Image (cartoon, rainbow, N blue to C red):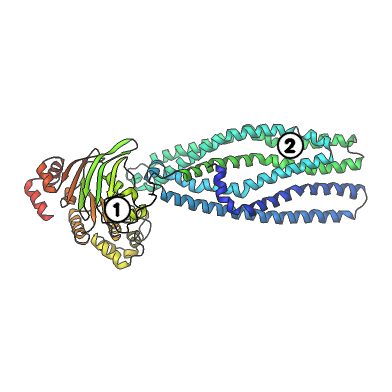
Amino acid sequence: MTVFGLLWKYLKKHIWVYALALLVITGLSAIAWLIPMWRGNIIYSVFFGGERHLIWRYILYILGLVVGREILRYGCLMYFETTSQNVMAKMRIDMYEKLQRLDFDFYSNTKVGDIMTRMTSDVESIRHFVAWTVYASIEQVIILIAAMAFMFHTEIRFAIAILFIFPIVGVLSYKFFKEVRPAYVEIRHRFSRLNSVVQENISGNRIVRAFAKEDFETEKFDVENDNFRKGHYKINDVNRRYMPWVSSSGGLLTIYVMVVGGIMVVNGYFGDLADGIATLAMLQGMLWMIVNPLNLIPNLLNDMRRFDAAAVKVKDIFEVEPKIVPAPVPVKKERLDGKVAFENVSFKFEGADTLSEVSFVAEAGQTVGIIGPTGSGKSTLTNLISRFYEPDRGKVRIDDINMRYYDIRTLRSNIAIAHQDVFLFSDTIGQNIAYGSPNTDSEQVKDVAARADAHGFIEKMPEGYDTVVGERGVGLSGGQKQRIALARALLKNPAILILDDTTSSVDMETEKFIFSMLKGYYSDCTTFIIAHRISSIMKADLILVMEEGKIIERGTHNELIALGGYYYSVFENQCGNFDLNEQLIMDN
């Protein structure tokens, strides 16, 4: 799809009225030559012919044409503006919907600032092209053609002599148009990087202040801001080398008409003195119809290149295809049982082996604990269950069906996830908990909050469940955010529950209470618990010990202790001597 193919997609529903408005603009531009013609008639008939009574007729003609032309022109401009706003709104909606369909791989390789630039300033450049650049270009071309046609009709020798300027303007415009494109493409990239720096700094402002890195961040911003400034300098440099010559062509034409035209009048090339002065007045009136388009060429060419660079960036979003492809005839099983089986699953992320030949079976209703060092593939394994990624080799089966055959929405509606890195929306606590189940009543929200041990601290907040939290949960502790995220996951009543180190920020007593509540109320839910604390997974039906993308140990707590391997060493380090270990086992 080309950039104009993208534009056509959104403009075609408006095309007939848009084309009609352009036709009206074309007509209004084509009859602009009437005003300088009437101006010449006034000079010839009134001042030299003595027909002074005609002056009011020509004044009314000119006034009527100007007023009527501006009213119609204003109506067309308002339509262009309205259409451009509709195009922009629809394009942004479609971009946003496309972003919702793209998978994790896209977001892993695309900066937020770049996405925001495409959604805002790039779409705005397209809107400006639809609203102004298209009509202005057509208008100025028609005015220029009409002026030259009138000059050829009036005095062909004079018109031929003017033609010398057009090859010069054409060559300069072509070179400018060719050289300025890479500069605009580069400046879009630099603007995206600048936005990314600002977005990251705002999102991580607490970290910046905690490490006293304000000066470092300011310097980083200064570098990108300076690069953005230099990008504009490149465009200005191209403008400097070409555009003054294009713009000055209008001045050359003015001098030409005054000098050459005056000489032709004096020497009788236009007839007698009256005819000569009237003709020269008409030609001078035509001059603005040539000079104005020449003066607008730099702005129009800049707008065209700005549109081209912006439309390419927007087009790229629409052309990205998600790697998670829906099944042609998807299985739509409203409620899953929750059985999960990995069959020789391998997965690479950015070229590196993340999982290698992973196989296990989690029966419906079982609890599976996953433990291992950082980077061992624990989170990747659970991401595959949610089909955020797909395995390079092997199969993931849910209820004995390859997960590729499920309807993606149906699959994910049966899975709830509570991450260690909690994201909360800038909304009330109640709305954050009910995010996955918006039709839930307040009592159910409070019930799951109690099971996640969150009800107590929520009730103590100024407005309880109606308390608005800051962006990303600013104002709440890590443990509070984790418990709200857990409540949000539990409210879905999922068939598969994934807890990715969800209780890492709560104390062991709170953790013990939470897991006792889960065991009592969600016995039919298959639960995957990623943890670094042995206490979180000791009671799991199956414990997987991972290292470098492989399962190196598996079994129950007692089986792994008896094995005396990695799990045993972690247990020893965390829980100390065997007497304490035995007491911990009894407590759990």
The percent coordinates of residue 65 (x first, y second) are 77, 54
Given the image, on which type of amino acid does mark 2 rest? Gly
Q: Is residue 94 visible?
A: yes
Residue located beneath label 1 in the image = 417
- Distance, label 2 to label 1, CA atoms, is 70 Å
The quarter in which the C terminus is drawn is: bottom left
Residue highlighted by disc 2: 251
Nearer the observer, 372 or 267: 372
Which amino acid lies under the numbered mark 1 shown in the image of this protein?
A: Ile
Residue 533, x across and y down, in percent = 19, 48
Residue found 78% across the figure and 43% down from its top = 286
Identify which residue, 362 or 402, lies in the foreground: 402
From the top left corner, tell me how far across and down residue 254 is, in percent. Answer: 77, 38
Query: In the rendering, which numbered label is found on residue 555?
Result: none
Left or right? Give the position of 419 relative to 245: left
Dot 1: what SS?
strand
* Disc on the earlier residue, 2 or 1: 2
Residue 379 visible in the shown view: no
Q: Residue at x 84, y 38 (%)?
A: 155
Front-lying residue, 344 or 554: 344
